[in-house]
Image: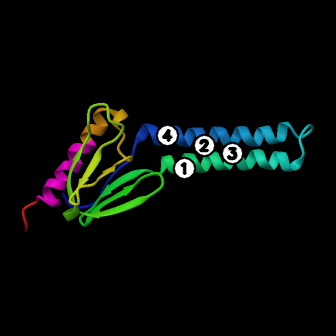
Amino acid sequence: MPGTTTWRPRKTRATAIAMAVLIMATMVWLAIAISDTFKTGDRIGIVLFGLFVVWVLSLLARVKVVADDDGLTVVNPLRKHRYAWAEIVGVSLGVGAPWPYLDLADGTTKGLVGIQGSEGEAAREAVAELKAFIADRGEGAEPA
């Protein structure tokens, strides 16, 4: 499995982007429409609040999991983690779980928000592909 594979949540990303556009358009329209009754500072505040909501939605839209020859990059809403294959023991997606969890050699687990359990079969396929990467390169892999 040479190369790079990237997994992103389709529904979450599409929803976050669509909502960001809709909310920002609404906030700008609202700031213009209420110009007779509100001061300029109030209208600027409405647009700034819209920008804050767009920023929060962009955090949700940016999530992804990237596997390459050297390791795994996990981009969650607030943090980005990089793991060498030797640090990774396994990955699991429980029934009804919101996302899979990465099992690390130090005994900790990390959520992979970039693979959404709500996407059903696509999530199970992504976890199966990731398990193949781990079996090939992870802590339990045979040395070359």
- Decide which of 5, 123 is in the foreground and name it: 123
Crowding at label 3, few (<14), some or many (≥20) Cα neighbours within 10 Å?
Answer: many
What is the number of the mark on residue 58? Answer: 1
Mark 1 near mark 4, Cβ–Cβ under 8 Å?
A: no
Identify residue type, mark 1: Ser
Identify residue type, mark 2: Ala
Prevailing secondary structure class for the magenta stretch in the rendered image: helix
Q: CA distance from mark 1 to mark 3?
A: 12 Å
What is the number of the mark on residue 20? Answer: 2
Crowding at label 1, few (<14), some or many (≥20) Cα neighbours within 10 Å?
Answer: some
Identify residue type, mark 3: Gly
- Judge depth for marks 1 and 4 and give the one in front: 1
- Residues rendered magenta in the picture: 126-140
- Judge depth for marks 3 and 4 and give the one in front: 3
The total of numbered circles placed on residues is 4
- Mark toward the start of the polypeptide (1 vs 2): 2
- Mark toward the start of the polypeptide (4 vs 2): 4
- Residue position marked by numbered label 3 in the rendering: 50
Q: Is residue 131 magenta?
A: yes
- Mark toward the start of the polypeptide (2 vs 3): 2
- Mark toward the start of the polypeptide (3 vs 4): 4
- Residue position marked by numbered label 4 in the rendering: 14
Label 1: state its secondary structure.
Answer: helix
Name the residue located 75 percent from the left edge and 43 percent from the top edge: 28
Mark 1 near mark 2, Cβ–Cβ under 8 Å?
A: yes
Crowding at label 4, few (<14), some or many (≥20) Cα neighbours within 10 Å?
Answer: few
**As drawn, is 27 to the left or to the right of 40?**
left
